[in-house]
Structure formats: structure tokens, C-alpha cells
Amino acid sequence: MIDQLKEFPHFAQVEREKLADLLARGKIIRRLYRSGLTVHEQHEKCTGMDIVYTGKLVAYSLAANGSETVVFEFASHSVIGANLLYGDQTNYPMNIYCTEDCVIFHLDKSAITELLRDHAFVLPFVQSLSFNSQGMNQKIVMFTQNTLRENISHYLTVLSAEQKSKVVTLPISKKQLADHLGVQRPSLFRELKKMKDQGLIEIDNRIIKICY
């Protein structure tokens, strides 16, 4: 497992003996989670930091009417819970579950406290805090300042850059896209239809051609 830990920037420069000691004491453990399984429930106390080795997860809020809003997504090398460890509010504000099979390294808070004495660990730890904060700020802008069309266009533009094509394949269902954008499915479908009618996009199930 040490070689796997060494793949993360957090541990690249940490001495192998230190990692071996934390593993032996059960301060770092590796677990497999199947797709659809909840890893952390809303209001559960955060007692450590997670690093995603493989797979994907989402953090979502559940409205009174039962609808879900995906607030944050976690992929390989993402860090979960670091921002909750040393603050006044130490409970998870949202549910976090796997959208794919995941392998996750769990680090006990005491392990983080020990590692923070190691300069090689500190900078990557701070960088992960900054990355998560920036991601949350982007979500806040999406939910409060942009129109739905602007958010759809931004999503498609990013997808186009990733897939290097103006014809993109949605990696998620339209329901999941609606959750990601924080809207109901009917609202998303109406806006996509308007964009199609105005010649901005062409849609064939999950395949979308960007015409703007």
C-alpha cells in the first residue's frame, strides 16, 4: 500500500518508514466501496481525511421535496473532509456517495496531526484545501449568479475541451446533469430544447453537437 500512497502528492516526499508505521497502527486504512454506497452521511461527525485512489463520488444535498442537488464531485486524488477536521463545524454538511466503485484511503485525524509536523506533507495538504475551496466557490457562482443556459454552455465548453471535439458525449445521464446544475429535470429539458430550437446545439440522446 505504501507504493499506492506514494502516488499522491501528499505522501510523495514523506518517509516510507513513517507511512509504514501509520499503516501498522491502523491510522491509514484502505477500503473498497461499491457504486451507489454512501460513504458519509449528512451531519455525521468527520473524524479524518479521505483520499480517493480510484472511482468517483458526489456530495449532494437533499431538498424537502426529495430532489437532489449535486454540490461537489470527487475523482481520483480528490481529498474529502480535510476542511472539517480543525474547525468549529466538524460534521459533514452533505451526503457523500459513490457513483462508481471506489478505493479510498482513510486517514485518522491523529495521523493528519502527526503528518502536519512534516514539511513535505504540509504544502500538498494546504493545496488540497485551496482546491476544494475554489471548487465550492465555482458552485456558489453557478447557483447564484449564472443563468441555466450559461451553466449548460459552460459545462459543454469544458466537456468539449476535455474530449477535443465539438461533438461531445455526456458522461452522465440528464438526471445527473440536472443534479449537477442544481435544477429540476424539466427545467433542464426545456432549456436544452430551446437551445436546440435556436440552432445552438443538436441532441441525440447523450451525444450533443455544439453549434455556437
Image (cartoon, grey):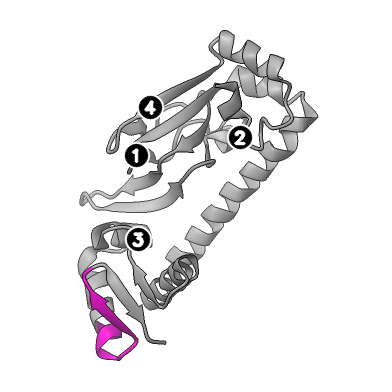
Earlier in the chain: of badge 4 and badge 2, it is: 2
Is label 1 in a helix, a strand or a loop? Answer: strand
Left or right of 152 in this view: 158 = right
| Residue kind at label 1, given as amino acid type | Cys
Residue furthest to the right: 119
Distance from label 4 to label 3 (Cα)?
Answer: 29 Å
| Residue kind at label 2, given as amino acid type | Glu
| Residue kind at label 4, given as amino acid type | Leu
Earlier in the chain: of badge 1 and badge 2, it is: 2
Distance from label 1 to label 3 (Cα)?
Answer: 19 Å
Q: What x and y, as percent, mark residue 59?
A: 40, 44
Give the residue pinned by disc 2.
7
Q: What x and y, as percent, mark residue 38?
A: 32, 33
Which of the two discs, 4 and 2, sits closer to the camera? 2
Which of the two discs, 4 and 1, sits closer to the camera? 4
Q: Could you tell me if the residues under marks 3 and 2 are in contact, i.e. CB atoms within 8 Å?
A: no
Q: Residue at x 47, y 22 (%)?
A: 30
Q: Residue at x 63, y 14 (%)?
A: 20
Distance from label 3 to label 2 (Cα)?
Answer: 33 Å
Is 3 or 26 nearer to us in this picture? Answer: 3
Is label 4 in a helix, a strand or a loop? Answer: strand
Earlier in the chain: of badge 1 and badge 3, it is: 1
Earlier in the chain: of badge 3 and badge 2, it is: 2
Distance from label 1 to label 2 (Cα)?
Answer: 22 Å
The disc placed on residue 182 is: 3
Q: Quadrant of the C terminus?
A: bottom left
Distance from label 4 to label 1 (Cα)?
Answer: 10 Å
